[in-house]
Amino acid sequence: METHKYQAGEITVIWKPKVCIHAGVCVKILPKVYNPKERPWIKTENATSEALKEQIEKCPSGALSYQLNS
């Protein structure tokens, strides 16, 4: 399955576009990070790792996830 990874300090944000249902939760919670009109559309530098983790946990489809960097 296609995945895109975005480094974010202590975490890596993982996006699976085929799983995404475009609910817009990510854009509503962190509009400075998620902007579907821009490329790349995820700018992890615009939020803390903690804010990213909190938002990702609210993704209704599971298209967004994260892994801890060692």
Image: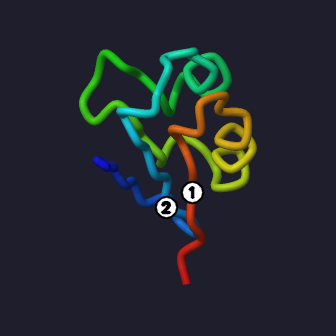
| Residue at (46, 28) in percent of width and height | 20
Residue drawn at 57 percent across, 15 percent down: 23
The residue that mark 2 highlights is 12
Residue 45, horizontal then vertical, whole percent: 47, 48
Residue 11, which numbered label? none
> Is residue 43 found left or right of 2 in the rendered image?
right
Number of marks present in the image shown: 2
Indicate the secondary structure of the residue bearing disc 2: strand
Q: CA distance from mark 1 to mark 2?
A: 5 Å
Identify the residue at the far bottom of this view: 70
Q: Kindly indicate the quadrant of the structure image that contains residue 31.
A: top right
Q: Residue furthest front?
A: 1
For the residue pair 62 and 33, the one nearer the viewer reads as 62
The image quarter containing residue 30 is top right
Residue 11 lies left or right of residue 54; in this view the side is: left
Q: Position of residue 50 (x, y in %)?
A: 72, 53
Q: Quadrant of the C terminus?
A: bottom right
- Tell me the crowding category of disc 1: few under 14, some 14 to 19, or many 20 or more residues within 10 angstroms, Cα based: some
Q: Which residue is mark 1?
A: 66
Q: Position of residue 46 (x, y in %)?
A: 52, 40
Circle 1: residue type: Tyr
Residue 16 spot, x, y in % from top left:
40, 42
> Secondary structure beneath disc 1?
strand
Q: Is residue 47 left or right of residue 17?
A: right
Asked if disc 1 and disc 2 are in contact, CB closer than 8 Å, the reply is yes
Q: Taking 49 as reference, is 57 above or below it?
A: above
Q: Residues within 10 Å of mark 2 (few under 14, many from 20)?
A: many
Q: Amino acid at mark 2?
A: Thr
Badge 1 or badge 2: first in the primary sequence: 2
Residue lying at 43% horizontally and 44% vertically, measured from the top left = 15
